[in-house]
Image: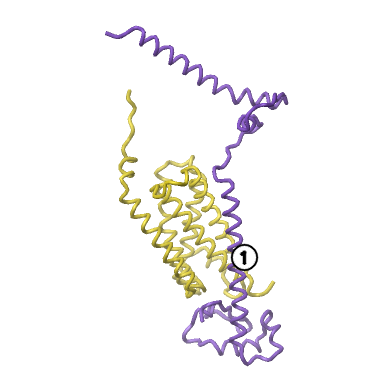
Chain colours: A yellow, B purple
Amino acid sequence: MRSQTWWYIARSGGIVSWALASLAVIGGLQLSTRLVRRPAPAWMLDVHRFLGGLAVAFLGVHLLGLAADDFIGFGAADFLVPFVSSYKPAAVGLGVIGMYLLLAVEVTSLAMRRLPRPTWYAVHLSSYVIFAVATVHGLTAGTDRHNAVFQWACLLTAGIVLMMTLVRIWSPRRAARATPVNGSD
Amino acid sequence: MTDPTTDIDQAERIRRLQARRAASARTPRAETSRAAAGSATGGGSRSTRQRGSARPRRRHPAAATRWVLGGLSVASFFTIAGTVAVANVDTVGTTQPVTPASSAASVSTPSAATQAPTQAAIPAAAPSATTKATPPTPAAQVPHTTTRGS
């Protein structure tokens, strides 16, 4: 295998993982806001879960590529401990934090029925942090940060997420959902 | 004053509802045992046949979409990797103007001798997008270059 192949795999895996995680966030916001009426909630939930799983899978590809690449020379500490990397410690540290958060969200979602709902929800809210951290990580640590297509994709995705988040915050459904439903008896 | 016929109707409706619930609760088990015994009579609907399998599984609502999304993700992965690889070869080709003709093979397996012009072409003080990593570079290694930075 060529010396740079692992580096290409790492870059490509990171970009695809970011895109899938962003789509999962947008799907989750669509589930909670019902901004677009057409996709059925069950279908959307299934796609949302699958996108999260795929994002984790391609995060594994990203890490595998970085571990196998002998140029940048990442060790276990660089992968596991934030801000200790010799290569752009701040940018790489954000990626490490995003990795932990993404794994936490995925694990708690898989164990959702065994967890108290407030706990699951609190962890799930960190998806916003994951999106922000992963985007900044890609724009600062990534080799493709000067790529115009990638920059526009980041801008567009951030705009969509921001707009849907504002709709989510101001949505009247939130107050309606918080109201407890009492039985007639 | 309550109408006695209304009470009777309500009691009858409750009785029918309970009977219907009991019947629907019994149905899957009965169908499962029938399917296990191999005594499917035919003429049942598709959903009935699916419910009659030994281990009923819930079908994912977006099963087909999952396949599409998985395929698109893998295709995107290879497309991006291939694009950066091809563009990197082009970049290396343009940043090695003084390389000898025999350096075509050195793109894949570069040596320290062919690396010197490449590194000289990249200003070290102003790292651009074409350099993957500046710092811990042993002399015998090649800097990864990217696609569209320059």
Q: Residue furthest top?
A: B4
Image coords of residue A112 (percent x, y): 48, 43
Q: Locate residue B25: give its quadrant.
A: top right
Q: Residue at x 68, y 24 (%)?
A: B34
Image vertical order of residue A38 relative to residue B105, above or below: above
* Residue placed under numbered mark 1 in the picture: B78
Q: Residue at x 45, y 72 (%)?
A: A140
| Chain ID, mark 1 | B
Q: Residue at x 54, y 23 (%)?
A: B24
Depth check: A21 or B50 in front?
B50
Image vertical order of residue A156 relative to residue B19, above or below: below
Q: Residue at x 46, y 18 (%)?
A: B17
Depth check: A84 or B34 in front?
B34
On screen, residue B84 versus residue B109, left or right, reads left
- Is there any visible trace of residue A123 in the rendered image? no
For the C terminus of chain A, the image quarter is top left
For the N terminus of chain A, the image quarter is bottom right
Image vertical order of residue B71 relative to residue B5, above or below: below
Image coords of residue A31 (percent x, y): 43, 47
Q: Crowding at label 1, few (<14), some or many (≥20) Cα neighbours within 10 Å?
A: some
Image vertical order of residue A2 relative to residue A33, above or below: below
Image coords of residue A19 (percent x, y): 50, 61
Q: Residue furthest left?
A: B1
Depth check: B54 or A87 in front?
B54
Q: Locate residue A158: give its quadrant.
A: bottom left
Secondary element under disc 1, as helix, strand or loop, is: helix
Image coords of residue A70 (percent x, y): 62, 73
Looking at the rendered structure, the number of numbered marks drawn on it comes to 1
On screen, residue A19 versus residue A33, left or right, reads right
Dot 1 amino acid type:
Phe
